[in-house]
């Protein structure tokens, strides 16, 4: 087993088979419905169970990050398993305190284990693309310098676009005003969201209807990556068919080297709502 290990959190929305294949350790965030009802994202609450509960209870839950103690326990277990270097890659620090918790845990172990805590400045499978590529290199026992160089490329070249089905969740979570939510619903505007270089959500564009929105996203992807080969991933919240259609459209227009369709987990789902689809892209490595 490699002495370099890769850690991420549940907001990376990595399918279990990929996490198992590349030996990725995933620490869960928490989904809180009430003072007495809290779940671990992807552990005690699956994405499908979350959306069923969301529809049944009509309550928008809150979310919280893992504690530094949880991170410290995980890092120590990896050390006991032979890890010498850990890349811990997490949800944008602008969206969660997860990065901070990992940083505190690292400080407690800095004399015992080489832990690199990385702010991905991304969300959902945009994190997953970075993590999966790093984990593949670690699994193949590539030199540490190769992982360091590839990480720099990945954090620079990765992009995500979100298409939300409803503005209700964004409004209730303070991302947009109530008036904007009502107006968008009346006009059937499809907002296209993205993350800035600093890792903050911002309105990239808007389109009248999903077809025009998809065309706008593909245009943006082609502008950024041109003819370069890319890895892509589509994440969805109860909208798998649309996610697959989006993947196929990108494959028709761009040089896609690999593609994945995955579910948006409970934590990201609590902020974007059912029906959301995202497309994440990163430049493939030069072989």
Image (tube, rainbow, N blue to C red):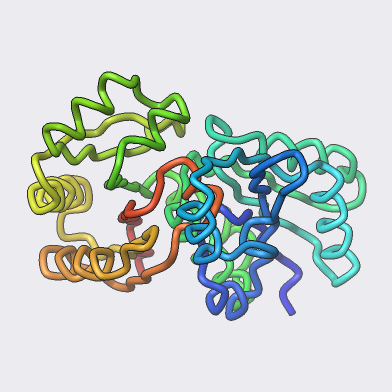
Q: Quadrant of the N terminus?
A: bottom right
Is residue 226 left or right of 129 when viewed as pictured?
left
Q: Quadrant of the C terminus?
A: bottom left
Image position, residue 57 (x, y; %): 53, 50
Image position, residue 93 (x, y; %): 58, 34
> Which corner quadrant of the image does residue 262 belong to?
bottom left
Give me the residue at 61% from left, 50% from top. 89
Up/down of 121 relative to 138, above or below:
above
Which of 97/133 is in front? Answer: 97
The number of callouts visible is: 0
Is residue 67 left or right of 14 when viewed as pictured?
right
Image position, residue 8 (x, y; %): 63, 56
Which of 286/68 is in front? Answer: 68
Which of 166/5 is in front? Answer: 166
Is residue 179 left or right of 84 when viewed as pictured?
left
Give me the residue at 67% from left, 40% from top. 64
Which of 11/146 is in front? Answer: 11
Is residue 247 left or right of 42 when viewed as pictured?
left
Image position, residue 274 (x, y; %): 38, 52
> Which corner quadrant of the image does residue 34 belong to?
top right
Query: Does residue 184 appear anywhere in the picture?
Result: yes
Give me the residue at 60% from left, 47% from top. 90
Give me the residue at 57% from left, 60% from top. 147
Query: Does residue 149 appear anywhere in the picture?
Result: no
Up/down of 270 relative to 277, above or below:
above
């Amino acid at each position: 087993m490699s002495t370099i290990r890769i850690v991420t959190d549940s907001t990376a929305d990595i399918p279990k088979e990929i996490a198992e294949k590349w030996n990725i350790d995933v620490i869960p965030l928490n989904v809180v419905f009430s003072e007495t009802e809290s779940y671990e994202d992807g552990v005690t609450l699956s994405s499908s169970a979350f959306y069923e509960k969301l529809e049944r209870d009509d309550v928008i839950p809150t979310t919280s990050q893992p504690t530094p103690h949880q991170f410290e326990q995980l890092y120590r277990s990896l050390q006991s398993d032979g890890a010498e270097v850990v890349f811990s890659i997490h949800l944008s620090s602008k969206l969660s305190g997860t990065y901070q918790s990992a940083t505190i845990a690292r400080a407690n172990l800095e004399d015992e284990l080489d832990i690199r805590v990385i702010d991905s400045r991304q969300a959902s499978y945009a994190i997953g693309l970075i993590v999966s590529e790093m984990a593949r290199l670690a699994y193949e026992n590539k030199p540490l310098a190769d992982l360091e160089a590839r990480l720099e490329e990945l954090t620079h070249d990765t992009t995500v676009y979100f298409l939300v089905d409803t503005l209700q969740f964004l409004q209730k979570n303070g991302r947009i005003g109530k008036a904007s939510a009502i107006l968008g619903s009346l006009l059937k505007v499809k907002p296209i969201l993205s993350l800035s270089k600093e890792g903050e959500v911002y309105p990239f564009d808007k389109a009248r209807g999903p077809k025009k929105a998809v065309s706008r996203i593909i245009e943006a992807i082609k502008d950024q990556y041109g003819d370069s080969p890319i890895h892509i991933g589509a994440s969805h919240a109860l909208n798998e068919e649309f996610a697959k259609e989006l993947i196929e459209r990108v494959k028709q227009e761009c040089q896609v080297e690999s593609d994945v369709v995955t579910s948006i987990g409970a934590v990201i789902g609590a902020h974007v709502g059912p029906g959301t689809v995202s497309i994440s892209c990163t430049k493939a490595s030069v072989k």
